[in-house]
Amino acid sequence: MSEKRAIVVTGVSSGIGHAVLEALTREGYHVFGSIRREADSERLANLYGAGCFTPLLFDVTDAEAVARAGREVERRLEGATLAGLVNNAGAAFPGPLLHQPLEEFRRQIEVNLIGQLAVTQAFAPLLGASEARRGTPGRIVNMSSVAGSVAAPFLGAYAASKHALEAFSDSLRRELMIYGVDVVVIEPGVVATPIWDKAEQADFSAYEATAYGPAARRLKKWAVESGRIGPPPDRVAAAVLRALRAQRPPARIRVVPNYLLDWVLPRMLPARLLDRIIARRLGLRRQDRRPPQGG
């Protein structure tokens, strides 16, 4: 392999992951990027070239495939140390918690939390978390969300996974101090990526007949509109670069459109007051309930 420093990034086919891939290769890093589909693997390999990018075909929920990718990267490094691991891959499964299928909730935790642990266990030794590894220790960057601190209605499963990832990252950061491997969390707010085109097509029909139908439609409309005018994903990529290269990076880096309105105020307000504001906007107060059908 070339003498470029290498970084593993999960979920690089689109959105934030692709912006991170673009930024890292532009800065001279070699990126090992995880992709789930062979077509995306070929597309990105042709776009960036073998000297800058190596595709890794795996899903973060496939522990055996993740472990194989770890061995493949170790072989290609030829004894060098990884400069970084960016745990970016993730998904969101929205729905009201009273009605969301348990299988869907489990899938959310599997993708956004257990998958991150599987990837971390596979690649952390290559970052320097191993007595056998020599060289400057690398860093781990975990892609969380403002939902890791402020949980919106109908995103309970997603928020739970990100709250858990925040705790996971704190424990991991303290455990890895013994190896000199740092852990930094990125907390994006609404970012303008193609995910909002998918969100617009999200099917909430299963919940339409419940008390949450109208409120779910309002939240979906707000999320799609906000997402399309949110900051571009390269702002998140810039935060990832800072996390990987700053001499003393903060434990958390937030990327939100408006720091005061999107981060400071929601955390400063009393929880009950924030509840009332959200409920009023979405129509979740008791007096907003639709009358029962039939009868």
Image: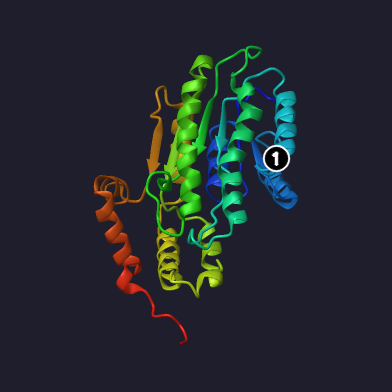
Q: Position of residue 27 (x, y in %)?
A: 53, 33
Q: Nearer the viewer, residue 65 or 216?
A: 216
Q: Residue at x 39, y 37 (%)?
A: 253
Q: To which quarter of the image does residue 68 belong?
A: top right
Residue 295 position within the rendered picture, expressed as x and y whole percent measured from the top left: 46, 87
**What amino acid type is highlighted by mark number 1?**
Pro
Task: Please give left or right for residue 162 compared with residue 66 in the image.
Answer: left
Residue found at the far bottom of this picture? 295
Residue 28 or residue 168, whichever sits in front: 168
Q: Choose between 137 and 68: the one closer to the eye.
A: 68
Quarter of the image with the N terminus is top right
Q: Quadrant of residue 148?
A: top left
Q: Pointer 1: what residue?
A: 55
Does the image show residue 241?
A: no
Q: Quadrant of residue 290?
A: bottom left
- Residue at x-position 51% and y-position 15%: 178
From what the image shows, is residue 37 above or below residue 117? below
